[in-house]
Image: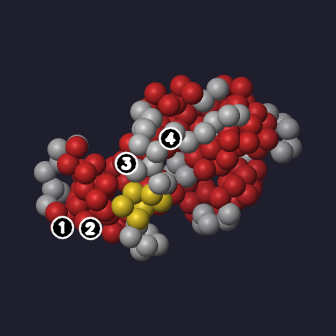
Amino acid sequence: MIWHFLHIRQQLLGFTVAFFLTVHWARQTAFAAPPVGSHRSTAAVDEIGIDVLKEAFVETDTDRNGLIDPNEFSTSLKSAYGGDLSDAELLNIFIQADTNSDGMIDMEEYICWARRIEMRRAQFMSVDLDSNGFIDLDEWRQAVARMKWQLSAEDVDKAFELADTNKDGQISFFEFVKWK
């Protein structure tokens, strides 16, 4: 039964730059976290303005050639995320964003990728019931129950332990997204 969780983890892998985009949006727009107790659905994706995404793209494209190369991408993520991502994770994220596999990310790829990230953030927020920025074991269990997965309590708890990579008893957004 843990395979259900492993499948969900695989789907979430590679979208860790939501933090970068959220920081950018917070600086550039009035984009704010929802009030405690409210939860955004995947409709939150529509809240991301194309102009904001284009501006984030231009900011990341430091050589201004209209394409983001792996170094520009990594530099932006490390800057926003504090360098906590390994080179392998950065490359994996880049590969997932580079949908045409040409070694560069163009504007269209970037926008599509950024919207996928926002969907992941909305998923996280739907599990983070108290809106404190973390998923605790009780919230995790409630999410599994809402999905009506028939998993043993042991499997649910083991999946939580796997996702809580820093072993602090809660899952941050970044752990949620990196969870494989």
Residue flagged by tag 3: what amino acid is it? Leu
Along the viewing direction, whichever of 39 and 64 lies nearer the viewer: 39
Query: Given this view, does label 4 or label 1 mark the residue nearer the observer?
Result: 4
4 or 2: tag closer to the N-terminus: 4
Residue tagged by mark 1?
Answer: 154
Q: Give the alpha-carbon distance from disc 4 to disc 1, as whole Å.
A: 33 Å
Q: Give the alpha-carbon distance from disc 3 to disc 2, as whole Å.
A: 20 Å
Q: Is residue 49 left or right of residue 66?
A: left
Crowdedness near tag 2: few (<14), some (14–19) or many (≥20) residues, C-alpha within 10 Å: some
Residue tagged by mark 2?
Answer: 158
Residue flagged by tag 2: what amino acid is it? Lys
Crowdedness near tag 3: few (<14), some (14–19) or many (≥20) residues, C-alpha within 10 Å: many
Query: Given this view, does label 3 or label 4 mark the residue nearer the observer?
Result: 4
Along the viewing direction, whichever of 25 and 79 lies nearer the viewer: 25
Residue 50 in picture, x, y percent from top left: 66, 25
Residue 136 in picture, x, y percent from top left: 36, 61
Can you name the residue that lies furthest to the bottom here?
Answer: 167
